[in-house]
Image: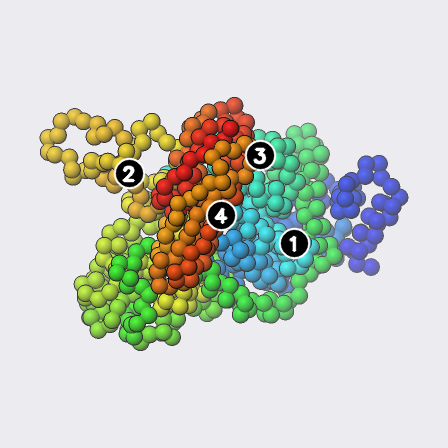
Amino acid sequence: MNRIIRNILSVAVLVLAGCSSAPQTETDRKVEELLSQMTLHEKIGQMNQLSGGAWLADQAAKGEVGSILNCVDPAEINAVQRAAVEESRLGIPILVARDVIHGFRTIFPIPLGLASTFDPEIVEEGARVAAVEATASGIRWTFSPMLDVARDPRWGRVAEGSGEDPYLDVQMGLAMVRGYQGDDLSNPASMAACIKHFVGYGAAEGGRDYNSTMISERSLRNTYFPAFKATADAGAATLMTSFNEIDGIPSTGNKWLLKDILRDEWGWDGMVVTDWNSAGEMIAHGFSNDLKHTAEQSVNAGVDMDMMSYGFIQYLEELVKEGKVSEAEIDRAVRNILKLKFDLGLFENPYVDETASAKVDYAPAHLEAAKQSAIESAILLKNEGGVLPLDKAKTILVTGPLADAPYEQMGTWAFDGQQEHTVTPLTALRQEYDVIWEPGLAYSRDRSTKEFAKVRNAASRAEAAVVFVGEEAILSGEAHSLSNLNLQGAQSELIAEVAKAGKPVVVVVIAGRPLTIERDLENCDAMLYSFHPGTMGGPALADLIKGKANPSGKLPMTFLRDAGQAPFYYNHNNSGRPNNGTETLLYDIPIAAGQTSLGCTSYYLDTGYGPLFPFGYGLSYTSFKYGNPVLDKGEYTENDVIRVSFELKNTGMREGTEVVQLYVQDKVGSVVRPVKELKGFQRVMLAPGETRTVTFELPVSDLAFWNIDMEYVVEKGDFNLWVAGDSASGEPVSFEVI
């Protein structure tokens, strides 16, 4: 008899016979009965996650590993699983994990690009495609979504999140969890999500990865917790600790975060895993003496599974014998792990069909979804004189290092995407135009200008030039922080050289973060910005350039004039000397100027107050006119719903989609409040000349925040409200909460 079946039958018998403390659910009963049969060594084995494949079979057979990561070969996965299920004493299956961040085989835009869509449905669809493809290879757990609010583009991992805004972060996170997990985790095509990194990792000082963070509890609660709280409440199965410390305590050893907040205050019952060796890194933090000490601190803080420090498997038995870790803590952790495995249906279906992946990888529907997400994620930043779309041109120059770079366009965290399935812009544009191809530069960091004369000559023979620049995949993502956010190599010089030909110049930026492209805007007529767009980025960009599709993406992060402005975000707290609309800039100051405060407002002398482009910004091939917003009344109570309506008109000649954004300002609070906060958005598609009434419904309860007494409340008082196409536009209307 199969060991799993035998085990489950024994559980059923014991349950029917009765037990002293009956758990609430059938799964709970199964967990408790299985737990009661486990030795301490077997329990600790479940808490151990290792990287590898078939070579871990011996450890699996001994019950010394509960999860593996970074194995994508179904045959190897089955080999490890077979050892665990058929050779270990209790037959507990292995949980297989992978960083499936924005697609498995079919690669979607990076998460920052997906956030640019302001479209939770398409984000959910992308996560569902990823789950279908990954589970077909045996992967049932992904370390995604990343919910770190990130306000410094120097930090490479901005690529992996949803940008600077907590509300957008919540919506994108919820969509990804729904997509990965589906309606039923036990469905073999469902994958457990892992919300990460808990917490504050995106606030690393100076944008340097793994750096310290300085975040108050109020900022944690108002800015950094909301996405974790929302997705935890929505049933996210697992959570990952972060590398950083909070108030001097590393996340992996932080009892206040993992027990007081996550378990006690939020009531979340999922499974907690460390980041890669984040337990071991507490030694480098100076928080732990040695690996044994980290194991003690991590388990007692509330960690369930250790990823790759080996501390649990080496030292937990000894720590229990010494009384430094209770077996009750071990049982708590193992309960969470076993529950997840039961919820995933691994006991019933531990193996993967080794032929299944061939049937779903790169399915036509998956490729179409990837293309549509890449279309919606592209942001039109400039379109002087309506140069785009190039719907009348026949012959174009295509140049630049990102025009035909299939590996680079997939972006960071695309381990399993395959270049041969990636369609580049050059390939796609050749289907639409007579293309003159001159790469100009071999890669984004190439400083050689020796090919520029050929590029300029080719530009003179074309009706228009399209220049593809940006970042190689390796220049963004984890551990890839930058202090200089300009285009690398001679890319800016290439754009300037093409412009000398006097033909219309379209620049397409393909990158993993917001770059400082102000100088490049001066040398082009139009600019499309595409965060690494994935497998179908080429056809998507070709459709946009040709005019078969109309850009609708909006910026999920503020675009800076210079990296020295970072961190910069729209929803900052007001200062006592806010900008008043006037600036005295560096070269406005006369020689031998007398000592003056130049207005006593908050701005940089060399860049001014404002960004290059605000959060939420993005143009279209058509134009939209916003009518005046009208509130249903002027006063509201805490239990009311605010209804605001306005007319939106497509005043151009093309069908287009506008992402309408709702912002609110709490004018006076018991603590200083942000100048503006996103509270809603809608994608509205309009035909040329069409007018539609758009209505937002905002519960007054959504205006709550953590006040001076650290209470989550709606405070009475005056508010401003905007509906606009970006965070810097629109005229406010006022209301009062009474």
Q: Would residue 405 be visible to someone looking at this image?
A: no
Q: Secondary structure beneath disc 4? A: strand
User: Which one is in front in this view, the residue at disc 3 or the one at disc 2?
Assistant: 3
Camera-side residue of 313 and 376 = 376
Mark found first going from the N terminus, 3 or 2: 2
Q: Residue 421: where, in percent of width, then height?
A: 47, 69
Q: Secondary structure beneath disc 3? A: loop
Q: Which residue is mark 4?
A: 695
Q: Which residue is mark 1?
A: 183
Task: Look at label 3 and name its amino acid.
Answer: Asn
Q: Secondary structure beneath disc 2? A: loop
Task: Look at label 2 and name its amino acid.
Answer: Tyr
Camera-side residue of 106 and 241 = 106
The answer to whether 25 appears left or right of 496 in the picture is right
- Disc marking residue 639: 3
Q: Quadrant of residue 623?
A: bottom left
